[in-house]
Image (spheres, rainbow, N blue to C red):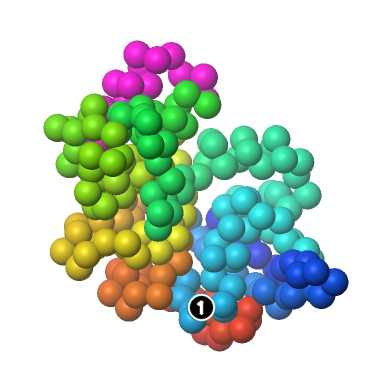
Amino acid sequence: MSALLELRGICKRFSLGEKQVEILHGVDIDVRAGEFVAIMGPSGSGKTTCLEILGALSRPTEGSYSFEGQPVHHLDDDSLADLRARRMGFVFQTFNLMPRMSAVRNAALPLLYAGVARREREERAADLLDRVGLGHRLGHRPAQLSGGERQRVAIARALANEPGLILADEPTGNLDEATSREILELFRELHREGRTLVVVTHNDEVASCAERVIRLRDGRIAQGA
């Protein structure tokens, strides 16, 4: 089976004043459809930068990136935005919710951008929030929710357009131990349904949920690709 995600020779450099800092050095990664993969590494190892490239949020300086066998690293910004909106869902450590919007409106945002009518998007968002255990909190704003509840809203939002790929960056990093386990069980359920998950984490318990662990060190693959 061909890879769903394929990175080849990925380098990523940033300008720091007059100096060029290279974060990734010739990284090769394959992720197959339906896999649950964790990317681990110490702070500064390049794992978040790698996830940003996989999620078409950042372009590599060198190398190629293919999604379902189609090169995407050369696409323009609008095409990359369309790919993210249609095929990917994102979950972040800091939740990235709109503070003045209710839970249901936050979860419905991808459907708004996709042009879905208001009534339909709010019904679909309400169903997703119910699925993640927040059916009783639809009208609450993020400030009225606990950290775990905000992350559940973020997961519902990530699922709004029914993507096959979920990308998560330290999804339990701001949560207590009990809430983290609940979020991980949601991830396991998504994986059992056949979705592909790529999770960046420094947490061994999170990584233990994955089928495969890729370890980065100093911007290079140390193990597992």
| Residue plotted at (50% across, 45% down) | 88
Neighbourhood count class around disc 1 (C-alpha, 10 Å): few under 14, some 14–19, many 20 upward: few
Question: What is the x, y in percent for residue 205?
Answer: 28, 74
Q: In the structure shown, which secondary structural element does the residue marked by tag 1 occupy?
A: loop
Nearer to the camera, 141 or 81? 141
User: Which one is nearer the viewer's eye here, 36 or 121?
Assistant: 121
Which residue is labeled 1 in the image?
A: 43
- Left or right of 44 on screen, residue 12: right
Question: Is residue 121 inside the magenta stretch?
Answer: yes
Name, please, the residue furthest toward the right: 18
Check the picture and name the quadrant holding the N terminus: bottom right
Q: Quadrant location of residue 51?
A: bottom right
Q: Main secondary structure of the magenta part?
A: helix
From the viewer's perspective, is 122 left or right of 117?
Answer: left
Q: Is residue 135 above or below residue 29?
A: above
Residue 13 to residue 32: above or below: below
Relative to 51, is 64 on the left or the right?
Answer: right
* Stretch of the chain drawn in magenta: 114-132
Q: Residue at x 76, y 41 (%)?
A: 76
Q: How far across and how far down the image is residue 94, in percent?
A: 40, 54
Query: Can you give x and y, in whole percent of width and height, for residue 99 in the image?
Result: 38, 37
Is residue 89 rendered to the left or right of residue 54?
Answer: left
Q: Amino acid at mark 1?
A: Ser
Quadrant where the C terminus is found in the figure:
bottom right
Count the marks: how many? 1
Residue, x 30% and y 40% (percent of image)?
Answer: 142
User: Do we see residue 116 in this rendering?
Assistant: yes
Pick the front one: 36 or 69:
36
Q: Looking at the image, which residue is at 14% across and 32% down?
A: 136
Instruction: Say if 178 sits above or below 156 in the image.
Output: below
Q: Which image quadrant is residue 119 in?
A: top left
